[in-house]
Image (tube, helix red, strand yellow):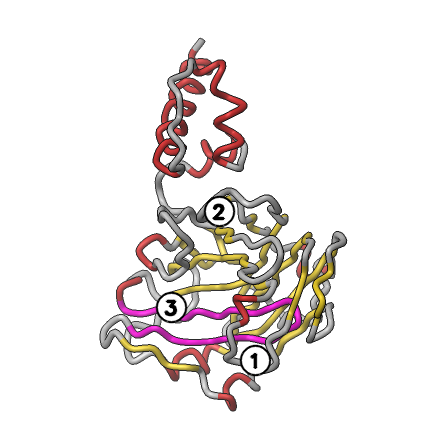
Amino acid sequence: MKMREQATTHLAAAWKVAQKRTRIRVPRLTIGHAIPSLLALLGYTLAGYAADGESPRTHRVSRVKQPLAVEGEWHEVAWRTIKPITLRHFMGSQPDHFPHVQARVAYDDHAIYVMFHVADRYVRAVAQKHQESVCLDSCVEFFFTPSEEASKGYFNLEMNCGGTMLFHYQNGQTNSSASIEQKDLERIEVAHNLPKIIDPEIEDPTDWTVAYRLPLELLKKYVSNGFDQPASGVKWRANFYKCADETSHPHWLTWSKVESQGPNFHRPDQFGILEFE
């Protein structure tokens, strides 16, 4: 009985979220009758919603003893030991195409390591060079603030499936944005398993990965103050995203839930938490 009461409480809370997240008028239904419609509106399972709750998502970042090889091999032995996160939420309307997206993140004394794996369709990449609008392509994004104070500023690293990136630092203290310099972009090791340019898009099911190594010294160059060196117990704020703005099936997926009527990844107030082991 207690489990049933708890499930009913979670469903009632989720139903309220669904009413807020859709412009369609939701009819009054009993909880039993509402379950199929509720799950369709939310786009994820009841178990996923209950696990997320209303508090910020938290992920523990593994420390590695040896530098990770940046080769884009999702099942490579060293990477396979790192617990992945999954992007379960979406922004805007529920997408017709909801790719399965996971990311792994780790660190050592010198760098942050990130790898994304996407089980996708309708894949395209047309950006020719770094700092172009890669978000229009099949793209994964890592937004993070190198401290627990999200208001101080954050990095947004956006990379399409062909390994082309846009990398900026948003300074929260001066309300300004700085592009990471080309010479610094060249210091970032990048790996990807698809060609740089994909046009026309690939409609068939396609698995793709991107991976990169971010030198900590590079990040410090752009942070005026408030850089917390990764170490056991240190926390950063972050979110992970997947988008495909100008493909035939656009979508905007997130790891940490973002309450917004339309797509807007620049919401550091709703970043989750990365806690370094």
Instruction: Give the labeled residue for mark 1.
Output: 188
Residue furthest bottom as drawn:
183
Residue range (magenta): 152-171
The CA span between labels 2 and 3 is 25 Å
Question: What residue is pinned by disc 2?
Answer: 90
**Mark 1 is on which residue type?**
Ile
Circle nearer the N terminus (2, 3): 2
86 is higher (above) or lower (below) than 211 = above
Question: For residue 51: magenta?
Answer: no
Give the Cα separation between the discs numbered 3 and 1: 17 Å
Going from the N terminus, do you reach mark 3 or mark 1 first? 3
Residue 159 pos. (x, y %): 56, 69
In the image, which disc is placed on residue 146? 3
Q: Amino acid at mark 3?
A: Pro
Q: Assess whether mark 1 and mark 2 are in contact (beta carbons under 8 angstroms).
A: no
- Give the percent coordinates (x, y) of residue 63: 54, 62
* Pointer 3 with pointer 1, Cβ within 8 A: no
Disc 2 from disc 1: Cα separation:
29 Å
Q: Are marks 2 and 3 in contact (CB under 8 Å)?
A: no
- Disc 2 or disc 3, which is closer to the eye? 2
Q: Label 3: few (<14), some or many (≥20) within 10 Å?
A: many
What is the three-letter code of the residue carrying label 2? Phe
Query: x, y percentage for residue 270?
Result: 35, 52
- Relative depth, front residue between 28 and 146: 28
